[in-house]
Amino acid sequence: MASSHLSRTFDQVGNRTTWTLSVWIKRTGIGGQQNFFGSFPQASDYERIMFNNDKIYIAEVAGSSTNWECETDARYRDVNAWYHLVYRHDTTQASSNDRIRLYMNGVQQSFGTNSQPAQNRGTAINTADVHKIGMGASSEYTDCEMAHFHWCDGQSYAPTEFGETDSTTGIWKPKVSPSVSYGTNGFFLKFDNAANMGLDSGGGAHNWTTNGTIVQNKDTPSNVFATWNTLGYMAGYATYSNGSTTLVGNDNTYGSRTNSTLAASSGKYYMEFKITNTNASYPRVGMISTENAMVDGQVGATANSVAYRLNGAIITNGSTTSTVNTFTDNDIIGVAMDLDNGAVYFSKNGTFQNSGDPTSGASKTGSLYSFTPGTDTYHFACTAFQSSSDLSANFGNGYFGTTAVSSAQNPDDGNGIFEYDVPAGYRALCTKSLNAEEYS
């Protein structure tokens, strides 16, 4: 959500002692204070749940006094995974430790700070005041993606009402249609209507107002798409936004090399870059092996990495191996990795360079980089140098930044949306496509 949020002033006071929040969250920015739900009658009087330096912090504040507060021991810093958070608020419980309970992926979390509310205390949430999702009183925006936001007024539900363990994979997954009651002010936001991201699907018509631009994308708890790894080697030399798909370089010496959160060792995968501001900084886009992603400062600096540079140079092992067309602002560069045959192809605005044919298989017709398959796993990667050198990646979500692609081309398996036609047999780098490759 970054600099956008949802808001709603509740029509009436609901149950102020008992309610349940359930939401799936994928973090795209870490650190700082990021509020994702709360009631804010005044700037100095509020109750909120937030990420506080990557811990979950829940508190009620009145003026300069904190009435109660709880903060987890654990930190939640994985920018690739979806977290399922369930917050059970029930001050009617006799045991103080049962009044505020927090669960992550079905597991109850412990609190390092554990000053719980008094029994039967009514809270600021569920009053006839403004409530916000994705923002604090005036800032503290949450940098994340959200899915299936349930808020159940008057009910204390266990996480098993909203999620369950997959019998095959052992992974915690969502229940798409949980049998729960939403009560007086409750709601269910699916975020499945791009024209109305605050639409309530809980039956109570408690719709929320969208403030700013909230983008709907294909990344969900059931199918995770790659983003840029903001915790990776050299990733700190850049600023990330738009769900960690837009990168702005901020270092002129070392460059801000980053790689995709997901990688593969077999199969065929495709993605697109849009160069939104070159700033004469010679950005590089391409592929890097997992091994070299840990130590390599630039894409194309080692033998197990290849880059297509702004000036048209194809670079591997630190040397230019061939030269193709240059690119500039607003050009779209496609990267096709054939990990079965050991080949990488680059396109510019839909045309593969060097007369490349990504479907040519073992002949590797027009490939701009060859390698021995099966020796490592590989990521998509890029490098930007100067400040304001911008690269927006489309890993299959269908957007460059906040702008949707215009032609909406799909891979053969239907997972992903791209600007240009995806070569036959190539897939987006996402968990459904990776699983299909792994278990085919």
Image: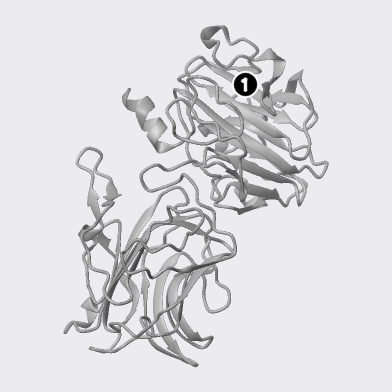
Q: Identify the residue at horizontal 69%, vertical 50% (top origin).
A: 248
Q: Is residue 270 visible?
A: yes
For this orientation, the residue located farthest to the left is 94
Q: Find residue 87 and report its horizontal and vertical position in percent.
A: 31, 69
Q: Element under label 1?
A: strand
Residue 239 in the image, given as x and y percentages of width and height:
65, 54
Of the residues shown, which amino acid type is indicated by label 1? Tyr
**Residue drawn at 52 percent across, 11 percent down:** 361
Percent of width and height locating residue 419: 61, 34
In this rendering, is residue 13 above or below 74?
below
The answer to whether residue 297 is visible is no
Protein image colouring: one colour
Name the residue: 51% across, 65% down.
Answer: 142
From the image, tell me which residue sits under label 1.
345
User: Could you tell me residue 167's position as x and y percent?
Assistant: 19, 41
Q: In screen coordinates, is 2 left or right of 173? A: right
Is 46 located above or below residue 439 in the figure? below
Quadrant (top left, top right, bottom left, bottom right) of the C terminus: top left
| The one of 96 and 92 positioned closer to us in this rendering | 92
Is residue 67 placed above or below 176 in the rendered structure?
below
Identify the image quadrant of residue 21. Answer: bottom left
> In the rendered picture of this protein, how many numbered marks are placed on residues?
1
Kindly identify the residue that appears in the image at 29 percent across and 77 percent down: 184
Report the side of 365 relative to 15 (left or right).
Answer: right
Whether residue 274 is situated above or below residue 338 in the rendered picture: below
Considering depth in this image, is 419 or 203 the residue closer to the camera?
203
| Relative horizontal placement of residue 424, taking residue 151 as reference (left or right) | right
Q: Label 1: how many residues lie within 10 Å, few (<14), some (14-19) or many (20+)? A: many
Q: Residue furthest right?
A: 280
